[in-house]
């Protein structure tokens, strides 16, 4: 074999290898993009998109983002938040621009069922607990922001007792004015915990997250509402039988009668609106 022919063969082998690598990379990108689109499929509920997946799928998605050093805003949506969003355009925009919206509560589960979708309920408090387990096991730092001072201090104590290796790098109660908010923002930016649990209640927690998220692109934020009260031990969750039957809201209403006005007639009206939306969608198909 002459030298020129040998060079041509080596050249074509090299060219084929490059083309093969490019095809592989392109295919991997297409597969990854397609899986992500499928993984994050959304269904609108009264104009607000809700991600459709199981508890474990949602957790795995966030776990992947943690490993890839990707930030995100997780919203644990419920009918009350949708009702607020219908009146507050800024809050509505934040909900619709969240990176991940998990269905928290029987109201959203029923709404999706009315639309013919069997969706697992993903309680934000339980989802957050699983995130804390992951953070402890894999060394991701955690920030805790919200609730009263005595509550958050008890939360820290309880978490440290249960999760010996959990790295809590930021702790702050949820009472602040505009000037203090600037200080909190600077503190969080400087410390940059990998996951920040924000317990300010809706819509305050989501609006705060939306403001600070652009400055902390690698942090995962999740609004956890009243979870700190439960984690502190100062408020008890409903017994498991209530949670299994989707009646945790009823247990909490009995324990806290002040919640009655928030649920009735809001929840029945919410479901009526969902039924009307589902009928309209079927008519236009």
Image (spheres, rainbow, N blue to C red):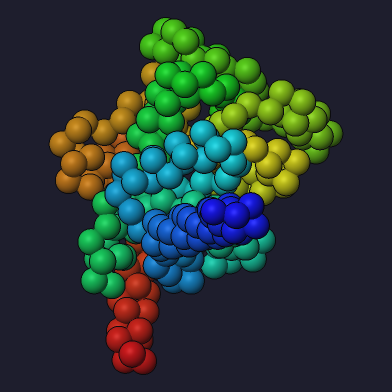
Q: Residue furthest front?
A: 2
Left or right: residue 18 versus residue 79 is right
Q: Quadrant of residue 84?
A: bottom right
Left or right: residue 229 versus residue 114 is right
Q: Quadrant of residue 195?
A: top right
At 38% across and 46% down in the image, what residue appears? Answer: 58
* Rendered position, 11 above or below 253: below
At 39% across and 67% down in the image, what residue appears? Answer: 43
Nearer to me, 33 or 122:
33
Q: Position of residue 82 (x, y in %)?
A: 48, 61
Q: Position of residue 8 (x, y in %)?
A: 61, 59
Left or right: residue 83 versus residue 162 is right
Residue 95: in sight, yes or no? no
Q: Quadrant of the C terminus?
A: bottom left
Q: Position of residue 105 (x, y in %)?
A: 33, 50
Q: Residue furthest bottom?
A: 284
Q: Position of residue 12 (x, y in %)?
A: 57, 59
Nearer to me, 271 or 41:
41
* Rendered position, 90 above or below 165: below
Q: Quadrant of the N terminus?
A: bottom right
At 39% across and 40% down in the image, what residue appears? Answer: 59
Q: Quadrant of residue 173?
A: top right
């Amino acid at each position: 074999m002459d030298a020129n022919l040998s060079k041509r063969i080596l050249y074509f082998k090299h060219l084929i290898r490059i083309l093969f690598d490019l095809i592989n990379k392109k295919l991997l990108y297409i597969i990854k993009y397609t899986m992500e689109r499928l993984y994050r499929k959304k269904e609108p509920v009264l104009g607000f998109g809700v991600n459709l997946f199981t508890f474990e799928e949602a957790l795995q998605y966030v776990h992947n983002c943690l490993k890839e050093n990707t930030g995100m805003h997780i919203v644990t949506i419920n009918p009350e938040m949708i009702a607020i969003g219908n009146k507050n355009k800024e809050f509505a925009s934040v909900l619709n621009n969240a990176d991940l919206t998990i269905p928290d509560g029987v109201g959203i589960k029923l709404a999706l069922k009315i639309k013919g979708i069997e969706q697992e309920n993903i309680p934000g408090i339980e989802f957050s607990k699983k995130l804390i387990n992951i953070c402890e096991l894999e060394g991701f730092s955690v920030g805790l922001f919200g609730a009263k001072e005595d509550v958050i201090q008890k939360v820290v104590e309880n978490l440290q007792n249960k999760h010996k290796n959990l790295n809590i790098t930021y702790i702050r109660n949820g009472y602040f004015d505009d000037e203090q908010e600037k200080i909190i923002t600077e503190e969080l930016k400087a410390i940059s915990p990998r996951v920040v649990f924000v317990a300010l209640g809706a819509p305050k927690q989501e609006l705060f997250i939306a403001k600070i998220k652009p400055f902390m692109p690698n942090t995962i934020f999740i609004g956890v509402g009243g979870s700190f009260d439960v984690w502190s031990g100062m408020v008890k969750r409903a017994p498991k039988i209530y949670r299994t039957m989707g009646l945790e809201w009823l247990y909490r209403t009995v324990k806290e009668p002040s919640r009655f006005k928030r649920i009735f007639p809001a929840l029945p009206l919410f479901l009526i609106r969902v039924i009307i939306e589902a009928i309209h969608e079927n008519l236009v198909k």
